[in-house]
């Protein structure tokens, strides 16, 4: 095995040196250290095979382990150096070449490199990748390369080093300029939205330093709403709505801006077009925005006017058609967030009455009883039960009365008689006793 490892290392180094035009002195030194250590490792193992003395074998074991650890260390350093040099070469081409073809090819290779994972993105960012790409986005002669360049930026900015570089080169301002410039293509706007979605992701823990984002947020949100409204495809809508959804987590002021822009109506109308909102992933973004906006009282009237309660009810039926794990997870999120949104909006009696008329309670009961109906998700179960929680918390707008004493049972922001809504007894029993069909 050690002989095979030795051969593979030699072969890899020779192949790389044949492929690359030039190697640094540091690279040559590491190559020599790795080859020497591999030879030493082979010699150790051969000596082990030539003796049967237990004491000698035990004494050599620690030497073998130490040598193997060093081989791994040198190998890792060599690979790191190779990848760094590759990133440097591509960035040099992007920065120095005036050729559209060479620049396009280099950006394409850089994008492929970034797809290899966060570690590669860190290397690219440290070598000035974000700076070089934003430089491209500020030159009109490279307009046709903006979509590809922005797509690469979105990949690199998944790491903290990329975010820091973006802030240093006023990347937010550049993105805002691109989004608000109507002369750019829809593809360019969509890829700029993808970068916004990436850097505002609630899953990232290093977005606090994006102070310049707040300064440009109104322009960015306005442009994204327009992109949602005018989207010609499901992919464009998905990117724009994902950016909006993330921004509503990023700062609450975004929700106020969305209300001023009549975004609720625009999103609800988009959902009626199955060509635009065509996947659970898109519906996940829409319902996320609705859920975050639903904390504002004025949302209720817009939901009623835009037939939003009907949409939220339909989302409670979201199921994966393909069985794909990512799609199934998206369906789960849609169900969960639609239940949460209904719970929040049901502060308004008109919303609650509309939900009841659309048979919301029987659907919630079914989701609680049947794990398969809720995509086997306990988070959906909890979300469904939260619709009952406000009724038991004594919200000031509720008419909370005892079903046993007064013949009524309360639901958020309204009350119905038991005779009128007998299924509410089942729902109360589920939420109080926990008979909720845990799978």
Image: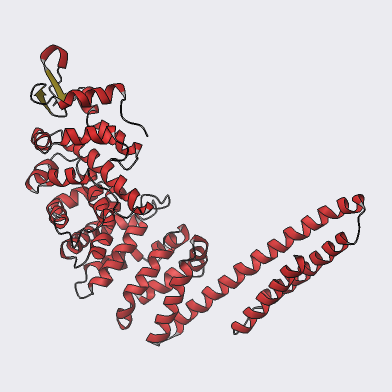
**Is 226 on the left-hand or right-hand side of 324?**
left
Between residue 187 and residue 435, name the one nearer to us: 435
- The C terminus: image quadrant: top left
Say whether residue 396 is visible.
no
**For residue 407, above or below residue 301:** above
| Count of marks, rendered view | 0
Task: Measuring from the top left, give residue 165's x and y in whole percent.
Answer: 43, 64
In the displayed structure, would residue 108 be above or below residue 436?
Answer: below
Closest to the observer: 166 or 361?
361
**Residue at x-position 34% and y-position 63%:** 195
Left or right: 72, with 237 as reference point: right
Question: Could you say where residue 101 lies in the image, as x and y percent from the top left?
Answer: 39, 86
The answer to whether residue 153 is visible is yes
Q: In the rendered image, which quarter contains the N terminus?
A: bottom right
In the image as oriented, which residue stretches furthest toward the top? 405
Q: Nearer the viewer, residue 437 or 34?
A: 437
Q: Examine the image and state in which quarter residue 419 appears.
A: top left
In the image, 363: left or right of 414? right
Near-viewer residue (71 or 45):
45
Q: Give the percent coordinates (x, y) of residue 375.
A: 32, 43
How far from the left and from the top, in percent, is residue 62? 82, 53
Model colouring: secondary structure
Q: Quadrant of residue 148?
A: bottom left
Q: Relative to residue 436, is residue 151 depicted above or below? A: below
């Amino acid at each position: 095995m050690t002989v095979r490892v030795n051969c593979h290392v030699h072969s890899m180094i020779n192949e790389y040196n044949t492929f690359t035009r030039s190697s640094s002195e540091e690279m040559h030194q590491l190559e020599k250290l790795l080859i020497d250590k591999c030879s030493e490792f082979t010699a150790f193992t051969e000596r082990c095979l030539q003796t049967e003395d237990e004491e000698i074998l035990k004494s050599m074991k620690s030497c073998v382990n130490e040598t193997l650890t060093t081989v791994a260390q040198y190998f890792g350093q060599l690979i790191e150096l190779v990848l760094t040099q590759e990133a440097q070469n591509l960035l040099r081409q992007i920065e120095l070449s005036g050729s559209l073809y060479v620049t396009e090819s280099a950006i394409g290779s850089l994008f492929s490199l970034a797809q290899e994972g966060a570690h590669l993105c860190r290397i690219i960012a440290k070598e000035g990748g974000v700076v070089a790409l934003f430089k491209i986005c500020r030159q009109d002669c490279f307009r046709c390369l903006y979509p590809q360049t922005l797509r690469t930026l979105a990949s690199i900015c998944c790491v903290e080093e990329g975010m820091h570089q973006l802030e240093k080169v006023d990347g937010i301002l550049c993105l805002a300029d691109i989004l608000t410039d109507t002369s750019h293509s829809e593809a360019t706007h969509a890829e700029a939205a993808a970068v916004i979605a990436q850097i505002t992701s609630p899953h990232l823990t290093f977005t606090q330093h994006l102070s310049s984002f707040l300064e440009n947020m109104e322009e960015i949100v306005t442009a994204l709403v327009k992109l949602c409204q005018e989207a010609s495809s499901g992919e464009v809508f998905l990117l724009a709505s994902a950016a909006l959804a993330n921004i509503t987590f990023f700062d609450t002021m975004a929700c106020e801006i969305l209300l001023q822009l009549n975004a609720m109506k625009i999103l609800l109308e988009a959902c009626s077009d199955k060509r635009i909102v065509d996947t659970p992933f898109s519906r996940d973004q829409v319902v996320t925005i609705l859920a975050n906006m639903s904390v504002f009282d004025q949302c209720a009237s817009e939901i009623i006017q835009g037939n939003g309660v009907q949409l939220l009810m339909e989302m409670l039926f979201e199921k994966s058609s393909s069985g794909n794990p990512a799609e199934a997870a998206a369906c789960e999120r849609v169900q969960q967030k639609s239940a949460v949104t209904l719970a929040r909006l049901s502060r308004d009696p008109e919303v609650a009455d509309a939900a009841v008329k659309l048979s919301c309670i029987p659907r919630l009961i079914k989701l609680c009883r049947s794990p398969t109906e809720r995509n086997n998700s306990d988070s959906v179960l909890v979300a469904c039960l939260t619709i009952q929680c406000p009724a038991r918390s004594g919200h000031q707008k509720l008419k909370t009365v005892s079903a046993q004493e007064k013949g009524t049972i309360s639901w958020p922001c309204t009350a119905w008689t038991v005779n009128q809504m007998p299924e509410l007894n089942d729902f109360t029993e589920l939420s109080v006793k926990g008979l909720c069909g845990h799978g």
